[in-house]
Image: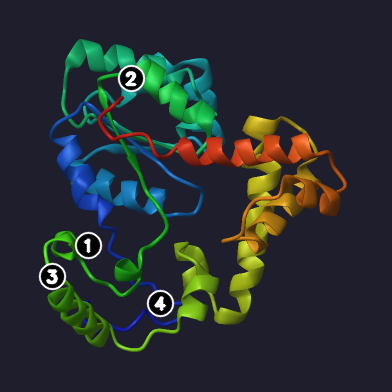
């Protein structure tokens, strides 16, 4: 890695996103691209840039009026963007819009016509898959990598890792470490890779991440668990994170939380489903 400093706190310079080149290529091959990912990983920033670059109309379903139209008259909304194509941000808020998009895609067969984004909820992933099977490239935007945080425009290529002999491999790794410069791994790990968190002052980052976890437990996981014990589920996520690298002991976790072991097992399954919702192969849909 080149010796590029991390961005200063509160800088407005955008981070490079390595997935951007991949999505551009997908738009030249598929009628639609579905960009999934956890909240606050930077999906909206990426698709806003693409909408300007490609001349697509940007529509966010976080907007009350747009959401109402997508729910009540999705065909009419699509007719208004027929000439440009569109980005539909937070498409999970109007699932029936996907069926209307499918009809337009099948009728017009235009490449790069739609970009759809959604949070990493199993319902959203399955909805895109069922409605747009074979018509969509499915991509996942994850938190910022270390190279993105260091403003490096291209991702690392590690194919040489498996091709070199031991002595050559050690020399190559030593060279990469020297180029990288000193890194505070404790600070990097604590901050994570969410753009909003990284842009905040160091003293505010823990509070932001705590709010993020609360939102995940109270909203996102509810898609899997319903209204089941959201406060205790949040505490479960915190306790499970504290046991990273250890063997899962559902009985011990259940005792600490005051719930049954099978409840802990169900919550572990919910976390897996939220994760797997964003890890399907890009072209299997």
Q: Is residue 133 left or right of residue 1?
A: right
> Disc 4 marks which residue?
11
Q: Is there CB contact under 8 Å for labels 3 and 1?
A: no
Can residue 276 be seen in the rendering of this structure? yes
Alpha carbons under labels 3 and 1: distance apart: 23 Å
Instruction: Please name the residue shown 76% across and 42% down the image.
Output: 230
Alpha carbons under labels 1 and 2: distance apart: 29 Å
**Which comes sooner in the sequence, label 4 or label 2?**
4
Q: Is residue 17 left or right of residue 250?
A: left
Is label 3 or label 1 in front?
3
Is label 4 or label 2 in front?
2
Helix, strand or loop status at disc 3: loop
- Single out the residue that lies furthest toward the front: 166
> Disc 1 marks which residue?
155
**Which comes sooner in the sequence, label 3 or label 1?**
1
> Disc 2 marks which residue?
132
Residue 116: give x, y in percent of width and height. 36, 34
Q: Nearer the viewer, residue 127 or 246?
A: 246
Instruction: Please name the residue shown 40% across and 15% down the image.
Output: 99
The mark found on residue 165 in the picture is: 3
Instruction: Please name the residue shown 26% across and 51% down the image.
Output: 19
């Amino acid at each position: 890695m080149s010796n590029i400093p991390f961005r200063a706190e509160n800088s407005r310079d955008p981070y490079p996103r390595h997935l951007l080149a991949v999505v551009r290529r997908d738009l030249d091959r598929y009628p639609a691209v579905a960009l999934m990912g956890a909240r606050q990983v930077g999906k909206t920033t990426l698709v806003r840039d693409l909408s300007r670059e490609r001349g697509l109309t940007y529509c966010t379903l976080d907007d009350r009026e747009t959401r109402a139209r997508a729910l009540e008259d999705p065909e009419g909304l699509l007719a208004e963007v027929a000439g440009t194509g569109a980005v539909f941000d937070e498409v999970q808020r109007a699932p029936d819009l996907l069926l209307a998009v499918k009809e337009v895609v099948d009728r017009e067969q235009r490449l790069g016509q739609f970009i759809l984004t959604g949070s990493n909820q199993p319902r959203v992933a399955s909805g895109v898959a069922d409605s747009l099977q074979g018509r969509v490239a499915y991509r996942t935007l994850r938190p910022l990598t270390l190279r993105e945080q260091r403003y490096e425009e291209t991702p690392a290529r590690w194919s040489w890792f498996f091709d070199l002999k031991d002595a050559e491999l050690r020399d190559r790794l030593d060279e990469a470490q020297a180029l990288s410069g000193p890194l505070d791994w404790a600070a990097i790990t604590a901050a994570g890779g969410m753009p909003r968190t990284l842009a905040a002052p160091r003293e505010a980052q823990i509070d932001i991440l705590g709010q993020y976890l609360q939102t995940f437990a109270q909203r996102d996981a509810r898609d899997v668990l319903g209204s089941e014990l959201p406060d205790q589920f949040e505490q479960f996520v915190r306790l499970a994170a504290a046991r990273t690298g250890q063997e899962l002991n559902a009985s011990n976790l259940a005792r600490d939380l005051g719930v049954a072991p099978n409840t802990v097992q169900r919550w572990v399954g919910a976390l897996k489903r939220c994760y797997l919702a964003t890890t399907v192969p890009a072209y299997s849909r």
